[in-house]
């Protein structure tokens, strides 16, 4: 267990009730997807987990850290969110620089992270010289460079075309299978969530809470053949039905 | 830059389906020449027509001198005009420098707290909207040292675009990037140096380009009001003086030098802006098509 959200409420300053009584547990090493319609509060959940906002009610508990804090967290936003004035290397270096990691160690970790996402050779390119998919890879490398205990991804591939998206899905899965981080992945695509996750939490419309959870019991090294398997189709149908029900209720 | 082919070549290795934006990096000499040609041609045509008009209509030189006579006067009076150019340049440059330093510092002060900004910004606006011709006489009375008085006038005109643009820039750092800095526990200082300041750069440079021209205008207007003579005279005084003594060709020559100074300042600041931003900012990107 890494984190547990109990009865979490979130009311924004303008009176919007984004979350009401949300329960969610994040287990060590799992790939958990948050699936729900647009505006149901998925981003809000990630922001609360990352500590970028305060819960209005309920609590978030952490385990496994010495101080009971949240520990290192990586965040990938829907947009690549890169500093346009900095090269790929400097962008990936940012989290380490902010923490004052010594240059030698930082350099090695930046190289490792850039290699991991397949961008070696682009260290000195500026964001505007990169395609959308490549920018997203930089953003992922930056999130991984601190070796986070928990990786939060907020619809990271939503603005990419489908072919690039499939490719990044696959690369992400391969990395995850190798490194076994814990991932919380926000998406509004049933297909993407079934393909990637070990578990899916389906959320209701706003105010959001988890309506139901589905464990995806499919073999670990997944590849394109999984996308066409009967098992995959079965899960997609199941999850779609749950999503429809959660949205209606 | 040699890295462009590398990027193209390596794309296969990354294998994303979408391609990087096509940017044309090489500045083509022919394109530059092609773009400069129309305005230069128009200029030449106007000058020729002007010269013809003056000669055919036999307009007296004290009403409207022809371009050739103006050039001749410029060469003949270079000994008087050149020192004046240096005086005007010195005042303009100093005013722009002080406006930049003070403008950026004031902008930084504004972004430290909304209250400071709200209390002081109106006064920056008041300073901006009050015509400099109207306050120049006062400043010249209060400040005995004429060059300093002129500098203050030019500064008043020049500093506002830098303050307002830099303030806007410092406040327009990307919201998600701010969140990211927060996530990694960045200090206020780190947020300022690594995020706000670079975000403000294009805005600041935009303000600087406007202020460059305004500093010159401020310096010239203030000198008109001051109407000083002697060794410390700038180009504006040469214009005034030539008017009094009916040396109209010299008046045009001095005017011509002021205009050229303005153009050079504009080009220099444009070049600076391009140099600083060319690697990353959209405004400095040349696209095909
Ligand atoms: N900073 C904010 N201030 C006020 N309302 C917000 C803010 N952020 C999000 N909301 C509102 O909260 C609801 C949930 O938003 P969000 O978490 O972004 O949903 P999702 O990511 O599922 O699309 C939306 O109705 C949105 O308008
Ligand atoms: Mg969202």
Image: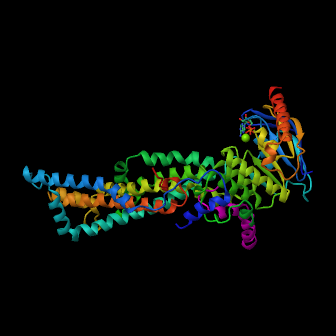
Vertical comparison of B246 with A205: above or below: below
Quadrant position of ligand 1: top right
Q: Position of residue B234 (x, y in %)?
A: 29, 63
Question: Residue lying furthest top in this view?
Answer: A248
Q: Taking B233 as reference, is B115 left or right?
A: right
Which residue is found at the position 36% from the left and 53% from the top? B136
Image quarter of the C terminus of chain A: top right
Q: Is residue A85 left or right of residue A167?
A: left
Please determine whether, in this image, residue A111 is positioned above or below residue B22. Answer: below
For the residue pair B235 and A51, the one nearer the viewer reads as A51
Measuring from the top left, give residue B251's x and y in whole percent. Answer: 20, 58
Q: In this view, does B219 lie to the left or right of A185?
A: left
Q: Position of residue B284 (x, y in %)?
A: 49, 56
Magenta-colored stretch includes residue B230: no
Can see residue B284?
Answer: yes
Residue B67, image quadrant: bottom left
Is residue B150 in sight in this rendering? no
Q: Which of A7 and B100 is in front in this view?
A: A7
Residue A110 belongs to the span the image colors magenta: yes
Return the x and y of residue A111 as percentages of the image width and height. Answer: 72, 67
Q: In the image shown, does A8 or B156 lie closer to the viewer? A: A8
Main SS class of the magenta portion in the image: helix
Q: In this view, does A178 lie to the left or right of B278?
A: right
Q: Give the range drawn in magenta.
A: A82-111
> Is residue A16 depicted above or below A159 in this figure?
above
């Amino acid at each position: 267990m890494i984190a547990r959200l109990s009865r979490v409420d979130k009311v924004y300053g303008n009176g919007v009730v984004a979350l009401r009584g949300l329960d969610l547990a994040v287990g060590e090493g799992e790939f958990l997807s948050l699936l729900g319609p647009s505006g149901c509060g998925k981003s809000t959940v990630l922001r609360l987990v990352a500590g970028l906002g305060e819960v209005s009610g309920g609590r978030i508990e952490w385990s496994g850290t010495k101080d009971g804090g949240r520990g290192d967290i990586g965040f990938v936003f829907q947009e690549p969110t890169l500093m346009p004035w900095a090269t790929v290397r400097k962008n990936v270096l940012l989290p380490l620089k902010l923490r004052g990691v010594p240059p030698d160690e930082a350099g090695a970790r930046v190289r490792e992270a850039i290699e991991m996402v397949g961008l070696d050779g682009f260290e000195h390119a500026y964001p505007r010289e990169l395609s959308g998919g490549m920018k997203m890879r930089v953003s992922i490398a930056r999130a991984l460079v601190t070796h986070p205990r928990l990786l939060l991804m907020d619809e990271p591939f939503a603005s990419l075309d489908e072919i690039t998206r499939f490719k990044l899905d696959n690369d992400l899965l391969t990395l995850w299978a190798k490194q076994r981080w814990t991932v919380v992945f926000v998406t509004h695509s049933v297909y993407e969530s079934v393909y990637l996750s070990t578990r899916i939490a389906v959320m209701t419309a706003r105010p959001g809470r988890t309506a139901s959870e589905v464990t995806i019991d499919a073999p670990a090294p997944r590849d394109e053949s999984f996308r066409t398997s009967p098992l995959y189709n079965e899960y997609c149908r199941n999850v779609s039905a749950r999503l429809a029900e959660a949205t209606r209720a | 830059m040699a890295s462009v082919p590398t990027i193209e070549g390596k794309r296969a290795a990354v294998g994303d389906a979408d391609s990087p934006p096509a940017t044309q990096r090489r500045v083509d000499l022919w394109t530059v020449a092609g773009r400069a040609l129309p305005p230069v041609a128009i200029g030449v045509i106007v000058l020729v027509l002007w010269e013809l008009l003056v000669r055919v209509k036999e307009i007296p030189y004290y009403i409207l001198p022809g371009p050739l006579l103006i050039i001749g006067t410029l060469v003949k009076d270079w000994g008087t005009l050149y020192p004046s150019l240096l005086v005007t340049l010195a005042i303009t440059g100093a005013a722009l420098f002080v406006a930049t330093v003070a403008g950026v510092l004031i902008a930084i002060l504004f972004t430290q707290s909304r209250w400071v900004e709200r209390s002081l910004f109106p006064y920056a606006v008041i300073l901006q909207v009050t015509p400099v011709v109207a306050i120049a006489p006062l400043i010249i009375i209060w400040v005995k040292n004429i060059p300093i008085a002129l500098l203050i006038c030019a500064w008043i005109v020049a500093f506002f675009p830098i303050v307002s643009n830099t303030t806007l820039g410092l406040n327009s750092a990307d919201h998600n990037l701010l969140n990211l800095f927060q996530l990694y526990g960045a200090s206020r200082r780190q947020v300022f140096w690594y995020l706000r300041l670079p975000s403000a750069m294009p805005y600041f440079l935009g303000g600087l380009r406007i202020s460059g021209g305004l500093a010159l205008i401020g310096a010239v207007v203030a000198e008109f009001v001051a109407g000083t003579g002697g060794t410390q005279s700038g180009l504006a005084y040469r214009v005034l003086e030539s008017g009094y003594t009916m040396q109209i060709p010299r008046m045009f020559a001095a005017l011509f030098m002021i205009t050229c100074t303005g153009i050079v300042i504009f080009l220099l600041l444009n070049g600076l802006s391009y140099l600083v931003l060319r690697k990353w900012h959209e405004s400095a990107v040349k696209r095909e098509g």
